Image (cartoon, rainbow, N blue to C red):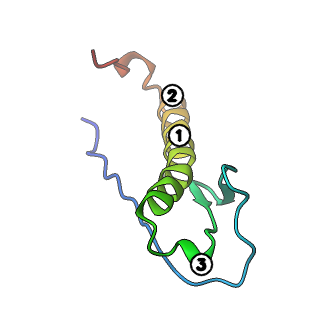
């Protein structure tokens, strides 16, 4: 029997002395399953900018984590267990 799978996501907002990410630019990979975006400090209360930044940083992190998980499962011989939700 397979073990259950825990999925966790950590989101942080913190001040930083780095230039902002180019408007509309992609997130920067900072580690395995970790991406970041730097927003202009003037946008710290702009909910649309904050939401956009969260989505631009989280989507590649989710895809990266999913690819790593699936690669590990296939290596363990889990190919026959794959399913697609409809």
For marks 1 and 2, give the CA distance: 16 Å
N-term-proximal mark, 1 vs 2: 1
Residue at image position (45%, 57%) is: 48
Q: Of circles 1 and 3, which is in front?
A: 3
Where is residue 27? Give x, y as percent. 65, 54
Residue 16 quadrant: bottom right
Q: Is residue 69 left or right of residue 16?
A: left
Disc 3 element: helix
State which quarter of the image contains the C terminus. top left
Residue for badge 3: 41
Q: Nearer the viewer, residue 72 or 84?
A: 84
Q: Is residue 56 shown above or below 2?
A: below
Q: Is residue 2 shown above or below 25?
A: above
Where is residue 14? Give x, y as percent. 52, 81
Residue for badge 1: 63
Disc 1 element: helix
Where is residue 33? Give x, y as percent. 56, 54
């Amino acid at each position: 029997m397979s073990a259950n799978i825990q999925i966790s996501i950590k989101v942080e907002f913190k001040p930083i002395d780095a230039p902002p990410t180019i408007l509309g630019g992609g997130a920067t990979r900072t580690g395995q399953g970790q991406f970041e975006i730097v927003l202009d400090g003037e946008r710290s209360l702009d909910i649309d900018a904050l939401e956009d930044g969260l989505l631009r940083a989280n989507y590649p992190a989710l895809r990266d984590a999913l690819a790593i998980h699936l690669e590990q499962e296939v290596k363990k011989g889990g190919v026959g267990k794959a399913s697609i939700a409809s």
